[in-house]
Image (cartoon, rainbow, N blue to C red):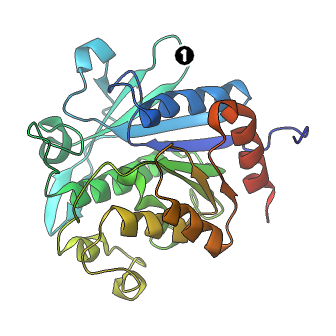
Amino acid sequence: MSNHKFMAKKILFINQEIFPYVSESEMSVMGKALPQLLQEKGSDIRTFMPKWGNINERRGQLHEVIRLSGMNLIINETDHPLIIKVASIPQTRIQVYFIDNDDYFTKRLMGKDENGADYEDNGERAIFFARGVLETVKKLRWIPDVIHCQGWMGSIVPLYIKTAYKDEPSFANVKVVTSLFNKDVEGDFGPDLRHFIEFRDANADVLSAYPERLDFNSLSKMAIDYSDGIIEAGTGVDQSLVEYAEGKGVPVLRNPGEDYKAAYKEFFDGICGED
């Protein structure tokens, strides 16, 4: 294992799930543990997740950050107000920013409704989340060295970082790492998602590389295509996605199991050490 000083000084975590705000799962446990680990190693951390409707704001002590809220994001030709809330994970020094919106999050559960069906606008929700995080990071005037995305909700972020936001000072030199987990949405994201994603340099030509109807696997491949490193984070990850990443020639960390702390640290060091 490498003994050199940890290089990833500023790390932005874009997480779909973080325990204890949502129930315990592979993703939510890692969503809490990894930022905590790397903060303890000396990194400056910012962490974001959606403000899912099943999050108890009073119990979690969430409160709105007025100076960061109030922007409108246009998706599907409709204005959607961006609300930012914040809380600190108990027994840690990790602060979490929550992306909220009445239409997409406040009144809804996570990827599936009360009957276990995928929400039809999950793709739009992912776009809103991605752009909401990136616009908020710009407002924070904080420039990350690494952006780490977990879950399909963050799968559009790498594309936007490398195209639509590539000239923004906050993101011009950032490295992007995507963690792959097991599939947690079933069907596709509808016939219009590829069009809705279009924003600045994330244009129709760029997006023509992907199917008309995007699904979990094609969004995952999009994330892989625009990432600088890939982590097999879950135990049930589709191996075709891991092999696709390896075929792209980007660094891939196979599931390290319980000894993930040393493996993740070394992997992030390697990503930051690349030119």
Judging depth in this view, the residue of 274 and 209 nearest the camera is 209
Residue at 42% in and 83% down: 206
Number of callouts: 1
| Image point (57%, 59%), residue name | 171
Left or right of residue 114: residue 235: right
* Residue located beneath label 1 in the image: 92
- The residue most toward the left is 115
The picture places residue 147, in percent across and down from the top left corner, at 57, 51
| Residue depicted at x 32% and y 80% | 211
Q: Is residue 27 visible?
A: yes
Image quarter where the C terminus lies is bottom right
- Image quadrant occupied by the N terminus: top right
Residue 148 left/right relative to 73? right
Residue 160 visible here: no
Determine whether 224 is above or below 248 in the image: above
Displayed quadrant of residue 57: top left
Judge whether 195 appears above or below 267 on screen.
below
Tag 1: amino acid: Thr
| Left or right: residue 74 compared with residue 237 | left
Above or below — where is 183 with respect to 250?
Answer: above
Q: Is residue 211 left or right of residue 44?
A: left
**Extreme residue toward the bottom, this view:** 205
- Closer-to-camera residue (229/176): 229
Locate residue 98: give its quadrant. top left
